[in-house]
Amino acid sequence: MAVSATSDAAQARYKPASWSTRLRQHPAGPVAVVCGGMLLACVIAGLLFPDRFFFLTQGNLSLLLRAIPNFGMVALGVGILMIAGEFDLSVGSVFVAAPFAMAFAFANGVPLPLAILLAFAIAVGVGLINAFITLRFGIPSFITTLGMLFIVRTVAPFVVGYQRSLSFRPPTEFKALLSGNAFGVIPAHFLWFIGLAVISYLLLNRHFLGNHFFAAGGDPRAARFAGVNVNRTKTIAFVLASVFATIAGIFAITRVGTASTNPQLFIELFAVAICVMGGLSLFGGRGSVIGIVLGVTVLQLVQDVIILARLPGFYLDMFVGLMIVVGVVLNQTIRRKY
């Protein structure tokens, strides 16, 4: 009888958590609820008011799918770096400068594969410089990458003789692969974004390097005692952030057919905001790829609703600011509770 009572007590003690508890504990839990609620509201509004709220039209859904990868690809790299405990504000300049260098080289007779390698070489170089300055001298990455943001933005037009824009006309096959439509309706670069998200998920959750990212961001001292090379891990994360920004920039200039050195304002801040909305901790060591994907989806849903409802554009900035504050508060609350 005593054994049976003990067994029952043990089962009660170790009863699996309910789905609602698991949802609250998961980094992407809150944004999943917000995203699901917004999608449901948009679908209902589209069905009730089809003549005024054009959410369910093919044109609007296609535009929505085309918009999500713009910030999403950058946010994936920024998110991996945030999980490792660092920030990169220079991705906005890398997003512009590295693809422009590729287009400039291609326009001057360099074969496209070599031009693409040049773009990624620039991305790797910027990532390595950010990592070296941050880790070697103990400077906050926010400051290091903020400085690099302005340096890259200034050097890019100087190197090419202050040329601000140029036409980018790659081979038809290349353009179709990056900016065409799959199955006739789904933008190709949206599928590329999903592919990058899957790769990022596997890296973070199915590879030892992902464990190192979480360890280095959560508690660097404990990670070192556990045998993790924290500096090398964070260096890889810095490089990935720049590489993902370059990938996003290559897709962008391929789609529009023009490369420019003019800065894309706030893309780095929107990437950080997406990560915060997706449940990533500003202090490192917590987050998920699913949260990043849902975060960028929420951002673009809000922008889409603002456009369809003909609301002022500053509503988006207000929403982003609100979600950053709410996201940080929720993250800290969950962190302390669990």
Image: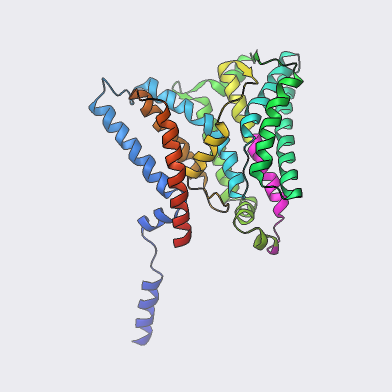
Residue 162 versus residue 20: which sits nearer the camera? 162
Q: Position of residue 225 (x, y in %)?
A: 69, 64
Residue sitting at x 73%, y 25%: 155
Q: Per the image, is 232 magenta? A: yes
Q: Quadrant of residue 75?
A: top right
Residue most toward the left? 48
Residue sitting at x 66%, y 24%: 99
Q: Is residue 238 above or below residue 262?
A: below
Q: Colour scheme of this structure image? A: rainbow
Q: Per the image, is 262 magenta? A: no
Q: Is residue 178 left or right of residue 130?
A: left
Q: Is residue 282 left or right of residue 238?
A: left
Q: Quadrant of residue 2?
A: bottom left
Q: Is residue 239 above or below residue 222?
A: above
Specify start and end residues of the magenta stretch as a single range: 225-243
Q: Position of residue 283 (x, y in %)?
A: 57, 52
Residue 157 versus residue 21: which sits nearer the camera? 157
The overriding secondary structure of the stretch rendered in magenta is helix
Using the rendered image of the protein, determine whether residue 21 is visible from the camera's viewpoint.
yes
